[in-house]
Amino acid sequence: MVEYTFSLDSTFGALSDPTRRDILRRVSDTELSVGQLARFYDLTFAAVSKHLKVLEKAALIVKRRNGKEQLVSLAPQALADAADYIEWYKQFMEARLDALEIYLKENQDG
Amino acid sequence: MVEYTFSLDSTFGALSDPTRRDILRRVSDTELSVGQLARFYDLTFAAVSKHLKVLEKAALIVKRRNGKEQLVSLAPQALADAADYIEWYKQFMEARLDALEIYLKENQDG
DNA sequence: ATATCATTCAACTAAATGGTTGAATATACA
DNA sequence: TGTATATTCAACCATTTAGTTGAATGATAT
């Protein structure tokens, strides 16, 4: 497995906050402006803007300007590295569960 | 999608540190004692012990006592919630990519 | 040009994180 | 029982993080 250390640090770091996960959810199927997003939370505009910056640095969202607004959407490759990482462990664990299952079957009447 | 907020906070938080990811990698296929793990890093024993506590709280590893030592291994359900979370986004993004592909095909000669 | 709306930046604060050292606990061994 | 080994706990420090407020920037409309 390749370890994209820097990328994974920021990806998982970004995902560790519930507000940021909620932002991802909201922009997962539609573009929303920074202001629209901010209205959902009991936070200042600036705080939400900071969360967006964290998500942007982690390449989980992208912004594009549309007149006065900045529109936020899920980045095309969002979560790809994180998915790869977790996939690797999933396979590992499945292998271990399979081994356990075989072991249990072989020792069924022990 | 269900949001296991607390669990995801600690899971992703635990995964955001490269030392902790390295620990996970090392115990992914074998049990290692806290001391054996500590030797791999240029950190004090106590610091590694703290990292292990973070991983344990996030239910990514388990410890069992074996005499004087504590043996560390990957938790059976490690990363399950994180995998579910990311899977949800993957499907979302695949759907969006499919839609894009269809759109591009339909407008091939436009 | 200027006023207004949307957003970011800068400076600050409080709390969390990652590290240290040294004392405390748990187990094994003589 | 006393000593050595393995690990954790407690107290502390430096850095990062998540939030605030208020000023600054960018874009549009008048």
Image (tube, coloured by chain):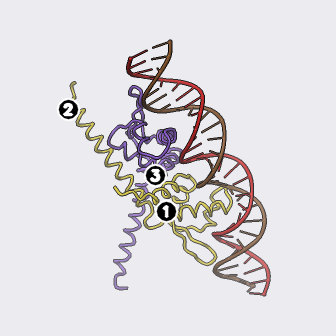
Chain colours: A yellow, B purple, C red, D brown
Disc number placed over residue A28 in the picture, else none: 1
Of helix, strand and loop, which one carries label 2? helix
A34 with respect to B19 (left or right):
right
- Residue D12 pos. (x, y %): 66, 40
**Mark 3 vs mark 2: in front:** 3
Q: CA distance from mark 3 to mark 2?
A: 39 Å
Of helix, strand and loop, which one carries label 3? helix
Disc number placed over residue A108 in the picture, else none: none
Along the viewing direction, whichever of A47 and D16 lies nearer the viewer: D16
> Label 1 amino acid?
Ser
The residue indicated by pointer 3 is: B18
Of helix, strand and loop, which one carries label 1? loop
Query: Upstream in the sequence, badge 1 or badge 2?
Result: 1
The residue indicated by pointer 2 is: A106
- Residue at 22% x, 33% y is A105
The reply to whether callout 3 and callout 2 are in contact (CB within 8 Å) is no
Along the viewing direction, whichever of A84 and A104 lies nearer the viewer: A84
Quarter holding residue B38 = top left
> Label 2 amino acid?
Glu
Question: Badge 2: few (under 14), some or many (20 or more) residues near its Cα, within 10 Å?
Answer: few
